Image (spheres, rainbow, N blue to C red):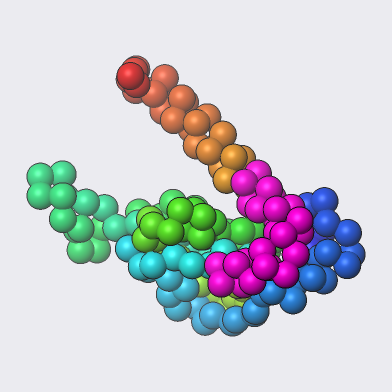
Amino acid sequence: MSDNISLFSGLDENETKKLHSYMESKRFKPLEAIFLEEMEGNAIYIVQEGCVKISKIADDEDSGEKVKDAERVLTYFREGDIFGEMSFIDDLPRSASAYAVEDTLLYIFRRSSFDRMIEDDPKFAIKVLLNISRIISQRLRRTDEILIYLATQLDIYFT
């Protein structure tokens, strides 16, 4: 399974086992919250099996308050996908909520485990951090593509 997970990209078999040793697994039931928008974020999640929905509650345009029952689904993650990396890196609250869609098993890589990894093996930690950076970069590039497409469709210019 680690072969198709970008967090493990470029790691040999021993390094893959080492990274796994810093993780834990947890099972979630359908509709169970993995984390909620605005919660403190301190972990990256990897879908081992199942499906996860990422959603956000829409804000009222006038008041800026959250609108009850105004959930917007942003994306779904399946086996091998990684999510939660933004809050793991920037220590800001979660920007969206994550829910299990079906019985789901996740690997959880906590920031405290990464901090321990830095102490144990700094070179290895840099390799892992580089992979996390690549994941974020890929997502940003994809977001840019979507933004450009939408701006073109709506004839909007960004300054």
Residue 122 image offset from top left, x and y in percent: 72, 59
* Whether residue 48 is situated above or below residue 126 in the rendered picture: below
In-image side of 149 versus 109 (left or right): left
Front one among 93 and 157: 93
For the N terminus, the quadrant is bottom right
The one of 37 and 54 positioned closer to us in this rendering: 37
Expressed as whole percent of the image width and height from the top left, the position of residue 55 reads: 40, 58
Residue lying at the far left in this picture: please name it.
Answer: 62
Residue 65: name its quadrant.
bottom left
* Residue at figure coordinates x 54%, y 80% from the top left: 28
Instruction: Tell me which segment is drawn in magenta.
Output: 111-134
Quarter holding residue 104: bottom right
114 magenta-colored: yes
- Image quadrant of residue 38? bottom left
Q: Residue at 74% across / 76% down in the picture?
A: 21
How many numbered discs, if any? 0
Height in image: 125 above or below 141?
Answer: below
Residue that appears at 26% across and 53% down = 58
Residue 79 lies, with reference to residue 148, above or below; the image says below
Name the residue furthest right: 13
Residue 129 inside the magenta-drawn segment: yes
Image spot of residue 8 (x, y percent): 76, 58
Residue 131 spot, x, y in % from top left: 69, 50
> Which quadrant holds the C terminus?
top left
Q: Main secondary structure of the magenta part?
A: helix
Can I make out residue 2 in this image?
yes
The reply to whether residue 6 is visible in this rendering is: no
